[in-house]
Amino acid sequence: MITWAYPDFIAVGVALAFVLLLLARHWARLGRAGRALGSPARHRGWKLTLRVAAGVALLVAAMGPSLGVSQRPVRTAGKDVWLLVDVSRSMDAPDVTPSRLLRAQAELEELVAQFPADRLGLVVFGAEATVQCPLTYDQAAVQVFIRTLRTSLLPPGPTTLREPLELVLKRLGTTAATPRATALVLVSDGEDFGENLEPVLRELGRTGARIYTVGVGTAKGARIPKPGGGFVRDSRGQVVETRLREAALLQLSAQTGGQYVELNDQQNGFDPLLRLLRNMPGLAEQVRTVAVADNRYRYTLAAALLLIALDIALTLTIIRL
C-alpha cells in the first residue's frame, strides 16, 4: 500500500490543472508556429506527451510516495522517568484550581509529551502503591493512564510516601544490567503517615536515581470535599483541613540530588522541573529498531529527469532536421 509523506492532494490537483492549462496554450502556439515552418504534428505530440509525463512524475516525487516499511536502528541515550502521583483523598482539595489532582494531571500530560525518546512509567499511591503503567516509550499510553487518575483508585487510608519509593526500587533491581539514568518525579501534597524514609532513600542513592518532588497545595490549605456533598471529617467528627507539607518532599529531593518545586495558583514548578529533566544526561546508549516508511521518491524523480532528457534530445533532433 502506498503512503505519502506530503499528502496534499488538493494543492497537487490545483498545480496539475495550472500546468495543463499552460501546456494547452503552449500547444496552440506551437501548432501555429509548426504549420508556418512545416513541422510535422507528430513531433509536437511526442513532446507534449513527454512534458506532461515529466510534470506528473515531478509532482508524485514531491509528494513523497512510500511503499512498505524498513527496520532501521536508532541509537539513543535515554532516561527512565517514573511519575509517582499521590491519589489520596487530600488531593481533591480545591486550594489549587480546580483541584490538586486535576491541576497535576494537566501538567503531567504536558511533561510526558516532552520526552519522546525516553521511557516513562506511572505509579499511583495513597495508603498503598501500585504500578499503573510500566516503563514504556509509548507517550500516548502514559497520557491515557494520567487522564484516568482519580482519588477513588486506591482504598482510603493514611498516605505513605515510602510505598511508592520501595515499589520503584524493586523495579530498578529487575532491570537490565545496562545502566540508565533514572529520575523519579513525585507529585504530592506531602502528607505522609508512613514509616521512616531513610532506609529506602539510602538504597535509591546507591542506584543513582534522583527524586524530583512537586508539592501541590498551599500552606493555608482547604477542606476536602466528599463526592456526595459535604466535607471529609475525622474520627471525632471534625472537618479535616489539609495543607501542603513540604518537609518530607524537601528531604526526598535533597538526599538524592534532585530538587523540590511547588505547584499552585501562583507558582508552576513544572517549568523549571522540565528543564532539569531535559538536562539530566542519559548514562548509556541503547540501540532501538524502529519501522520507517520506505520513501520511493527517487524512482519517480529519476523517471522525470529521464523524460526531460528525452524531450531535450527530441528537440535537438528536430532542429537538425
Image (cartoon, rainbow, N blue to C red):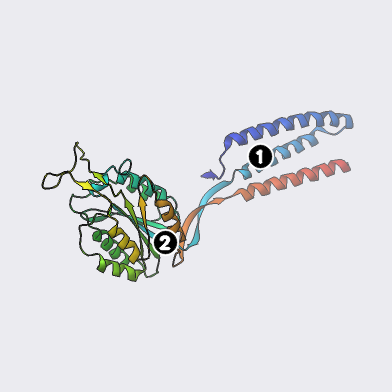
Is 151 displayed left or right of 311 in the figure? left
Residue lying farthest front?
A: 220
Residue 172 in which image quadrant: bottom left
- Label 2 crowd (10 A; few <14 / some 14-19 / many >=20): many
> Could you tell me how far apart the alpha carbons at marks 2 and 1 are, in whole angstroms?
46 Å
Q: Which residue lies furthest to the left in this view?
A: 236
Q: In which quarter of the image is residue 196?
A: bottom left
Q: Which of 240 and 302 is in front in this view?
A: 240
Q: In this view, does 61 lie to the left or right of 223?
A: right
- SS type, badge 1: helix
Left or right, 268 with reference to 51: left
Element type at mark 2: strand
Q: What residue type is labelled 2?
A: Lys
**Which numbered marker is on residue 174?**
none
On the image, the x and y values in percent for residue 179 come to 39, 69
The mark nearer the N terminus, 2 or 1, is 1
Q: Is residue 71 visible?
A: yes
Numbered badge on residue 56? 1
Residue 148 appears in the rendering: no
List the residue tagged with mark 2.
Answer: 79
* Amino acid type, mark 1: Val
Above or below, 89 against 23 in this view is: below
Q: In this view, does 159 lie above or below 198?
A: above
| Along the viewing direction, whichever of 274 and 17 lies nearer the viewer | 274
Quarter of the figure that contains the C terminus: top right
Q: Could you say which is closer to the camera, residue 296 or residue 142?
A: 142
- Image spot of residue 227 (x, y percent): 21, 39
User: Which-is-in-front pick, marks 2 and 1?
Assistant: 2
